[in-house]
Amino acid sequence: MGYKRVLLKLSGEALMGEQNYGIDSSRLEQYALDIKKIHDEGVEIAIVIGGGNIYRGVQAEASGIDRVQGDYMGMLATVINAMAIQSTLEKHGMYTRLMSGIKMEAVCEPFIRRRAVRHLEKGRIVIFGAGIGNPYFTTDSTASLRAIEIESDVVLKGTRVDGVYSEDPEKNPDAVRFENLSFKEVISKGYNIMDMTAFTLCQENNVPIIVFDMNKPGNLEKLVLGKEKVGTFIS
């Protein structure tokens, strides 16, 4: 089954590509072309992206910065990434809107739920930056919350691994990949997919999560259009 409206969660670290920090333009290009394929098919797309390639709020205390201040710094990092992906998408002919959890009118709109839904209905790609605008919440939580608010069919968690495994596949080549899991199974077995706040939000509001490898070109199209079973489906 294909999906009509999706929320795509991307990690900031993924934008580094083979670099140690920052944004790899070739990775941005690949993401934009994959997103364009499903956009051209009429899929309504919202995006949440992390900021770990620039700064992570959890680094704050280790470096002597107040945790709340560090979280706000991390939110600003997500806006930098959001602006980068917005520019790349528009270069390929897609209309976008960047909406922020923190007011910064010079570069993006404030998040207003009805306006976000209207943008999606008009075929614009909506990018959510600056988290939910509050410290102590991750971009995973932002993805779950925004997916619920815009009534997304699914949360697509794009990672560098092709699903959920019984163990870390990079450490154990015999680890088993799951095609389907329930929310209860993930919690009982302790699989680290999202932080618990984000995961519980999806569970309580019946929003399925699909964990898949976003770095493999074509995976997003196969998944969203129902062409092929990709990743791990959690419901």
Image: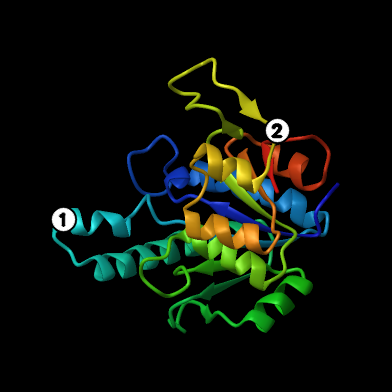
In the figure, is residue 162 to the left or right of 71?
A: right
> Amino acid under label 1?
Ser
Helix or strand or loop: what does disc 1 sit on?
Answer: helix
177 is higher (above) or lower (below) than 27: above
Q: Secondary structure at mark 2?
A: loop
Nearer to me, 14 or 180:
180
Compared with 226, 149 (above or below) is below
Nearer to us of marks 2 and 1 is 2
Q: Nearer the viewer, residue 179 or 25?
A: 179
Q: Classify 10 Å Cα crowding around label 1: few (below 14), some (14-19), many (20 and above).
A: few
According to the picture, the residue beneath numbered tag 1 turns out to be 63
Q: Is residue 107 visible?
A: yes
- Find the residue positioned furthest to the right: 1
Q: Which residue is pictured at 50% across the width and 62% down the height? A: 141
- Answer yes or no: is residue 86 visible: no
Please give the count of numbered marks on the rendered protein: 2
Where does residue 61 sit, x and y in percent of width and height?
19, 58
Residue 166: where, in percent of width, then height? 55, 28
Question: Which of the two discs, 2 and 1, labels the residue nearer the N terminus?
Answer: 1
Q: Which mark is residue 179?
A: 2
Which image quadrant is residue 150 in? bottom right
Image position of 233 (left or right of 196):
right
The location of residue 194, given as percent across then percent down, is 51, 50
